[in-house]
Image: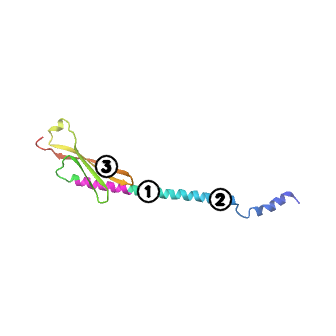
Amino acid sequence: MRPDCRIVNSLPNANGGFALIEILVAVSILAISLVVIFQLFSGGLKSRKLSEQYTRGVFHAREKMAETLLTPDLSEGETQGEFEDGYEWQMTITPVPSEEDEEKMSVGLLNIRVRIVWHEGERKKSFMVDTLKVVKKDNNS
């Protein structure tokens, strides 16, 4: 008998099933893939929650700014309060300094800043909106 015939005959018996090392490699690849997929899913949920919080903050800031801009007599100063859902607001109204030429004008500018603050666990997050409003100057000045 030729020696290479024996090798050819014994090969099909060796390839009849999976080796233990092949199964371990396949299970390891599957486990790593599942961990990565679950981490991506978890990160997506965290991003969604953060996006929802900022969207709510923007909504509150726009609401408070619109309310302030519709107020006929604004005065400078700071005010603050809280919305029903736990978001807090702080508003600062300051006059914009005018140039010498602008002193003679009958209108002035107010800077309105609305800051929305909310708590996420131990941390505070905030969102701020600024705008200017043209107002009539007092005749006394």
In the image, taking residue 17 as reference, residue 84 lies left or right, namely: left
Mark 3 falls on what kind of element? strand
User: Image quadrant of residue 94?
Assistant: top left
Q: Which mark is residue 46?
A: 1
Disc on the earlier residue, 2 or 1: 2
Mark 1 falls on what kind of element? helix
In the image, taking residue 69 as reference, residue 118 lies left or right, namely: right
* Kind of residue sitting beneath label 1: Lys
As drawn, the residue found furthest toward the right would be 1
Q: Residue 24 carries which label?
A: 2
- Magenta-drawn stretch contains 27: no
Disc on the earlier residue, 3 or 2: 2
User: Front-most of 101 and 21?
Assistant: 21
Q: In which quarter of the image is the N terminus?
A: bottom right
Mark 2 → mark 1, Cα distance in angstroms: 33 Å
Mark 2 falls on what kind of element? helix
Asked if disc 2 and disc 1 are in contact, CB closer than 8 Å, the reply is no
Q: Give the range drawn in magenta.
A: 52-67
Residue at which label 3 appears: 128
Number of residues whose C-alpha sits closer than 10 Å to that of mark 2, classed few (under 14), some (14–19) or many (20 or more): few
How many callouts does the rendering have? 3
* Kind of residue sitting beneath label 3: Met
Q: What secondary structure do most residues of the magenta stretch adopt? A: helix
Mark 3 → mark 2, Cα distance in angstroms: 54 Å
User: Image quadrant of residue 6?
Assistant: bottom right
What residue is shown at x 64% (from left), y 57% (from top)? 25
Residue 139 location, x and y as percent? 11, 43
Mark 3 → mark 1, Cα distance in angstroms: 22 Å
* Kind of residue sitting beneath label 2: Leu
In the image, taking residue 84 as reference, residue 24 lies left or right, namely: right
Disc on the earlier residue, 3 or 1: 1
